[in-house]
Image (cartoon, coloured by chain):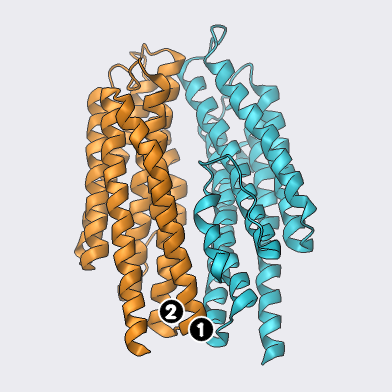
Chain colours: A cyan, B orange
């Protein structure tokens, strides 16, 4: 029984890694489709998001089954509840990739990237892919130093996000309303993607150390879900 | 012991209702502060969001404690896990209210509502308050017909959301980039608020009936903002 239980927990972890890998593929394709107006790439991302959703639901079911059958306590209980929380955030990262792909598809054959922001969005896209890869590694290896890397990458993405608004709201901005809307939404999706990664990383660190890394980012969706693990 | 357990489950439910009530107050104040550029009202919302977050965390702690100590099974287990998921969504509704208030405060003493969209945002604000009230009632009474009301209200909000983009992207739109950015973000926050309410309502219905209504919330979260954009 004990053996079976540990097998289940490992299964939870490997499924999280698998979903994170799918999300990395999605954000890579999404940001490339957005940058290059590749509509067929965008459509792949949109079609594949359903798989990510299914995997996340299956993982949740597994977690609930473990709770019901094996009634874990203490650290094991925390692992299972954390998996439930984390899977929702990773699934949302997939949604953000899909949103970016939808922007690319909608504007096609026009370019979705507003003039003057190509460099910024290319860089944001690369950093989103990077943060997703690092998150996958963190989930796989539990090497907590990777959480710092994720936070640093998120800081870089936040800076780029701010620079988009600076640009759009500057006197030199010549974009039409369409370009302004696209820049606003695209930038927010890129930034939210990274926020979710930070949120997941915090939960992983908390699970391992019991240390909740306070952060000034009060808008972070992370805050809600994790302190719950306190008493578990 | 059995007695204590049922007490705990009731406690979970009443705490969810309490948080939903706080969110209703928040969205009411936020949308009014946004419509009228009332910066002190906006600041109340921003300050009060921390309370909502705290309550949600406390509820999560209670849920985890119940899992650890009472090891519920079957339906009781589903109630506790649903509460964990629902509390995160309700807390996010509070965040959306805060985002709307932040827009109001940020633009002050200028008006945050772009010209030509005052009527639309007033209506969206009223519908967000309405959906939040209905959700609170649903959580309190478990009257599942209210889930339909919530879905209908969400449809109305989605229409208004689409009309914002239609307006902003039309030839008659004379707004500066600032107004375009504000309209885009404000409309998205209003619409996301309602999406979370629908997501919570579906989970409540699922808990009661085992029937997952058609489109999974992950999909409709994904589609909403962008499908609107497609129409615009």
Q: Label 2's element?
A: helix
Hey, which quadrant is residue B160 in on the image? top left
Q: Are marks 2 and 1 on the same chain?
A: no
* Total number of numbered discs in the rendering: 2
- The answer to whether residue A104 is left or right of residue B39 is right
The chain carrying label 2 is: B
Q: Quadrant of the C terminus of chain B?
A: top left
At a point 39% along the width and 49% down the height, the residue shown is B51
Residue A14 vs A65, above or below: the answer is above
Residue B225 vs A16, above or below: the answer is above
At a point 27% along the width and 47% down the height, the residue shown is B24
Q: Label 1's element?
A: helix
The chain carrying label 1 is: A
Residue A104 vs A212, above or below: the answer is above
Q: Categorize mark 1 by other alpha carbons within 10 Å: few (<14), some (14-19), many (20+).
A: some
Residue A72 seen in the figure: yes
Indicate the position of residue A118 as horizontal and vertical percent values.
67, 23
Residue assigned mark 2? B77
The label on residue B83 is: none
Q: Nearer the viewer, residue B208 or A214?
A: A214
Report, in whole angstroms, how far the alpha carbon at label 2 lies from the one at label 1. 7 Å
Hey, which quadrant is residue A141 in on the image? bottom right
Q: Are marks 2 and 1 in contact (CB under 8 Å)?
A: yes
Indicate the position of residue A156 as horizontal and vertical percent values.
70, 33
Residue B198 vs A208, above or below: the answer is above
- The answer to whether residue B180 is left or right of residue A217 is left
The label on residue A68 is: 1
Q: Residue furthest top?
A: A171
Indicate the position of residue B14 as horizontal and vertical percent values.
29, 66
Residue A37 seen in the figure: no
Q: Nearer the viewer, residue A210 or A50?
A: A210
């Amino acid at each position: 029984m004990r053996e079976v239980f540990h097998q289940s927990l490992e299964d939870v972890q490997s499924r999280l890694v698998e979903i994170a890998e799918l999300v990395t593929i999605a954000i890579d394709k999404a940001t490339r489709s957005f940058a290059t107006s590749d509509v067929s790439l965008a459509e792949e991302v949109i079609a594949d998001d359903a798989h990510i959703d299914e995997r996340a639901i299956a993982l949740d079911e597994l977690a609930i089954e473990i709770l019901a059958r094996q009634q874990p306590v203490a650290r094991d209980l925390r692992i299972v509840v954390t998996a439930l929380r984390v899977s929702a955030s990773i699934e949302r990262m997939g949604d953000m990739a899909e949103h970016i792909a939808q922007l690319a598809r909608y504007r096609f054959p026009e370019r979705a990237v507003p003039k003057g922001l190509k460099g910024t969005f290319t860089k944001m896209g690369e950093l989103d892919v990077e943060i997703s890869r690092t998150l996958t590694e963190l989930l796989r290896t539990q090497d907590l130093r990777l959480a710092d890397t994720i936070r640093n990458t998120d800081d870089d993405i936040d800076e780029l996000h701010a620079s988009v608004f600076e640009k759009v709201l500057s006197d030199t901005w010549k974009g039409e309303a369409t370009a302004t809307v696209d820049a606003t939404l695209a930038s927010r999706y890129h930034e939210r993607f990274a926020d979710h990664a930070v949120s997941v990383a915090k939960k992983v660190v908390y699970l391992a150390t019991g240390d909740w890394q306070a952060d000034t980012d009060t808008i972070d969706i992370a805050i809600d879900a994790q302190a719950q693990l306190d008493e578990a």
